[in-house]
């Protein structure tokens, strides 16, 4: 591999000149700069990024830690993060915690070792102790899709309580009085907030949550778990006439399972999802869902992180909350034809 000494020798310049061409090209005479750049291109020289970061005292890297990279919701969030980072000359390292606290800790440590300038994270649990440890070591952190309980930390989230209310109120308005709520672990703040929204809408309608809601708690929020939820819902003594799923993947899995059993959607069971991922509107029976501004979430979170790392003196911590939107489609509204 070509090193900086060989580049300097072939170009007939000092090591300092090569370094200036790489880091401060405006300091080098144009003819000399072009000669050095030609040698770099001919030899395939690649600068040592880690060494340059140590000398400069900062890194172009940003860590992005999400719960499930296979979930299209996080794909769109990551696109927003990447676009904002790219515009600022930064590079994103994507990490998938798989809803595992242990994996999350390993990634936080690895990102710290890489001397990233900051970390965007959707934490596995509601505790912020590990995040505070990272911040105390001088690394900026922004909570993504999770509101912060501290005004010393930036966060970007969606009002998931309101989203849960929207979904449940819509089903109640269609005449449903026995509603299933299919969800992942309640340790996930998003899930707990959506449940709070469900219960609030039920109580506002003057119904008893114990009778009106069937809670189906699953290990994760995947299509496989969504398929498994069908058996749990249908085996109840009083099966629901409608189901609200805490994300669209669960809803897709449930719809698959119900369709295989010959159960009509929405004529037999109405379905509402959450997120509005790309496939939601193109299903054979388009999915009613609560839309989150996914791209905007990622973009805004990255902007806040970059502001904090690049202009710490002017930066003030913000807790940004976006509003969800109910998109009514065919999976929840049954049109009776006369």
Image: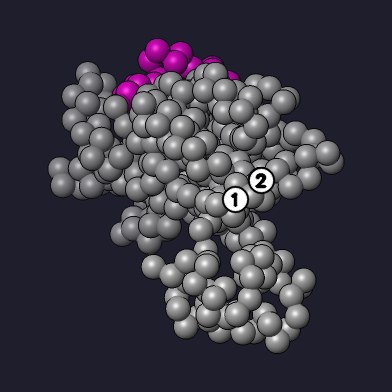
Can residue 163 be seen here? The reply is no
Q: Which mark is residue 71?
A: none
Can residue 74 be seen here? The reply is yes
Point out the stretch of residues depicted in magenta: 202-218
Relative to 248, say whether 138 is above or below: above
Residue at image mark 1: 53
**Quadrant location of the N terminus?**
bottom left
Disc 1 secondary structure class: helix
Q: Residues within 10 Å of mark 2 (few under 14, many from 20)?
A: few
Q: Position of residue 169 (x, y in %)?
A: 53, 33
Disc 2 secondary structure class: loop
- Residue located 75% across and 80% down the image: 29
- Residue located 49% across and 72% down the image: 6
Asked whether the beta carbons under mark 2 and mark 1 sit within 8 Å of each other, the answer is yes
Magenta-drawn stretch contains 6: no
Protein image colouring? one colour
Distance from the alpha carbon under mark 2 to that under mark 1: 6 Å
Magenta-drawn stretch contains 211: yes
Residue at image mark 2: 57
Q: Position of residue 108 (x, y in %)?
A: 47, 33
**Quadrant location of the C terminus?**
bottom left
Q: Residues within 10 Å of mark 1 (few under 14, many from 20)?
A: some
* Residue sitting at the far bottom: 31
Q: Position of residue 292 (x, y in %)?
A: 55, 46
């Amino acid at each position: 591999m070509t090193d900086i000494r060989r580049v300097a020798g072939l170009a007939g310049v000092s090591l300092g000149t090569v370094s200036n061409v790489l880091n401060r090209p405006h300091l080098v005479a144009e003819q000399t700069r072009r000669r050095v750049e030609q040698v770099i291109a001919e030899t395939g020289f690649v600068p040592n990024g880690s060494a340059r970061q140590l000398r400069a005292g900062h890194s172009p890297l940003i860590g992005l830690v999400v719960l499930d990279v296979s979930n299209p919701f996080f794909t769109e969030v990551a696109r927003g993060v990447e676009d904002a980072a790219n515009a600022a000359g930064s590079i994103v390292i994507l990490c998938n915690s798989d809803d595992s606290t242990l994996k999350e800790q390993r990634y936080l440590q690895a990102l710290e070792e890489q001397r990233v300038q900051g970390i965007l994270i959707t934490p596995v649990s509601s505790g912020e102790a590990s995040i505070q440890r990272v911040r105390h070591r001088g690394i900026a952190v922004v909570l993504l899709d999770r509101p912060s309980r501290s005004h010393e930390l930036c966060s970007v989230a969606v009002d998931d309580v309101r989203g849960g209310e929207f979904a449940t109120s819509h089903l109640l308005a269609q005449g449903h009085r026995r509603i299933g709520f299919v969800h992942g672990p309640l340790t996930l703040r998003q899930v707990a907030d959506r449940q709070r929204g469900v219960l609030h809408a039920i109580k506002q309608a003057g119904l008893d949550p114990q009778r009106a809601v069937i809670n189906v708690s699953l290990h994760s929020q995947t299509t496989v778990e969504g398929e498994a939820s069908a058996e749990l819902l249908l085996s109840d003594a009083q099966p629901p006439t409608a189901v609200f799923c805490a994300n669209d993947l669960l809803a897709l899995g449930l719809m698959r399972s119900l369709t295989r059993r010959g159960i009509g959607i929405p004529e037999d069971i109405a379905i509402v999802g959450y997120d509005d991922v790309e496939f939601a509107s193109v299903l054979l029976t388009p999915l009613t869902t609560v839309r989150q501004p996914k791209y905007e979430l990622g973009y805004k979170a990255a902007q806040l992180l970059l502001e904090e790392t690049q202009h710490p003196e002017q930066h003030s911590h913000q807790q940004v909350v976006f509003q969800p939107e109910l998109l009514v489609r065919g999976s929840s509204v049954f049109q009776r034809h006369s």
